[in-house]
Amino acid sequence: MKETDLIIIGAGPGGYRAAEYAAKQGLKVVVFEGAEVGGTCLNVGCIPTKTYVHSASFSEARERMAQVVPQLRSGVEGILSHPNITLIREKGIFSAAHTVGDYTAPNIIIATGSDSKPIPVPGIDSPKVVDSTGLLSLDTLPKRLCIIGAGVIGMEFASVFHRFGSEVTVIEFLKECLPALDSDIAKRLRKQMEKEGITFNMQCGVKQIADGEVFFENKKGQTESVEADVILVATGRKPRVQSDFACVGFDYDERKGIAVNEHFETTVSGIYAIGDVNGRQMLAHAAEMQGIHAVNHIIGKEDNIRFDIMPAAIFTSPEAACVGPAEDWLKEQGTAFECHKSFYRANGKALAMGETEGMVKLCTEPGEGRILSAHIFGAHAADLVQEVTAFITLGATLRQLRETVHIHPTLSEVLIEVN
Ligand code: NAI
């Protein structure tokens, strides 16, 4: 048995960033990865989909994905070639609490990610049914695409495949898309996508899939159906737990993932679980920051990473992005707050770009006090939300945001134009 300081299972954004950071702090790190390095994000998630979003056609997207993904993957391989890191190209399997493969370490970080979660309906195993990975590996553009689930994955693919020319129909269980988003923003985004020609069947439950036909019950209890060449199931993801985890002794659940405390440590001391596998915030950037915090905890270094301030974006066209609590949630909690809005149509840069569809909503403490949250729908929403994230993290007020000089003409001026 070989000894090391830290074992990391999984080389996705959580795992490889933690390995890089730990190695720079002087730890000897062993990383186990059974598939390509880069995880879901780089190989079949964020990066390929963003390549699609920024391509003019399906064929261009396929070509660009074939260049971008290997290029980034070799970048990750470069990171993992640090002298303090040993990359073992096999699946990491526990044989005891602190032993994985041929290695033993006082600290272990599990970063195994997640898998798509299928729905239990008859016909789900039809060859026309794919998950997001399957959709990204299609060689031809489907003429008719049916998407089950109007969450983040469903909405991003609906937007991009519609732009490529597919006839897109979305079936969603709930009343509104993107359940985690501020409902005002979610509704505007769906309405805009409807206006562009995407069909949404809201409050509809899928009952059966027969060959290329999806049968669902509408809100009136009637059965309807949609015919499609490809059916994307985007009804959520589940933490990737392994059967060998049982021998370690920490608490975990097949559905909710591995239970962790505020330092992402499991119920067994020295064993951490970061990223999608702990089921907290299924976002690549959350996984990265959780990994850094876990390493800091291991080496006894304090940090002030604010996991309660987690920006997120949906890369539809236009984008939607948010940070902090939705207006609906603040109302439900009875929190005293103010809501400030502005619109892209009054912004010079947005007009010049032909991107006038968009809205900014900032929730603040009363009296233009501390900024609590930002919800944005429109071009480059993610970049604008990132600016507000910095202000919220620093505890800044709306007044301080307004008093910060913004370059003219930029979209960022929409932030200081809020009413
Ligand atoms: P999701 O949880 O965002 O949305 C799933 C949707 O499917 C929900 O609206 C739900 O009501 C609906 N649904 C569930 N069962 C259904 C049924 N039987 N019939 C109709 N609708 C049904 O899950 P999604 O989109 O699969 O994404 C998985 C995870 O990946 C999320 O945690 C997401 O945050 C993350 N992700 C993040 C991205 C980003 O940050 N840009 C991009 C892609 C994924």
Image (tube, rainbow, N blue to C red):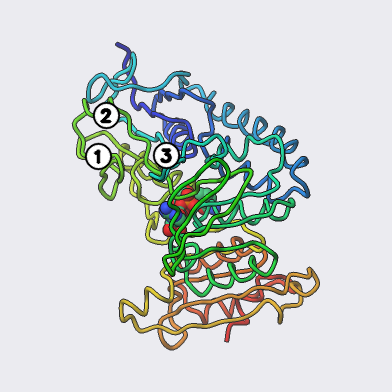
Residue that extends furthest to the top in the rendered view of this protein: 1
Does the residue tagged 3 have its C-beta within 8 Å of any atom of ligand 1? yes
- Alpha carbon distance from label 3 to label 1: 14 Å
- Alpha carbon distance from label 2 to label 1: 9 Å
- Can residue 310 be seen here? The reply is no
Near mark 2 (Cα within 10 A), the count class, few <14, some 14-19 or many ≥20, is some
* Whether residue 96 is situated above or below residue 54 in the rendered picture: above
Q: Position of residue 15 (x, y in %)?
A: 44, 35
Q: Are marks 2 and 1 in contact (CB under 8 Å)?
A: yes
Near mark 3 (Cα within 10 A), the count class, few <14, some 14-19 or many ≥20, is many
Quadrant in which residue 253 is drawn: top left
Q: Position of residue 157 (x, y in %)?
A: 61, 51
Question: Which residue has dot 3 on it?
Answer: 114
Q: Position of residue 358 (x, y in %)?
A: 65, 73
- Picture residue at 63% right of the left edge, 41% below the top: 48
Q: Position of residue 161 (x, y in %)?
A: 67, 51
Question: Which residue has dot 2 on it?
Answer: 245
Mark 3 or mark 1: whose residue is earlier in sequence: 3
Residue 95 circle label = none
Of the 4 image quadrants, the one containing the N terminus is top left
- Picture residue at 31% right of the left edge, 77% below the top: 333
Question: Which residue has dot 1 on it?
Answer: 252
Task: Please name whichever residue, 117 or 382, is drawn nearer the observer in this view of the structure.
Answer: 117
User: Is residue 302 found left or right of 367 in the rendered image?
Assistant: left
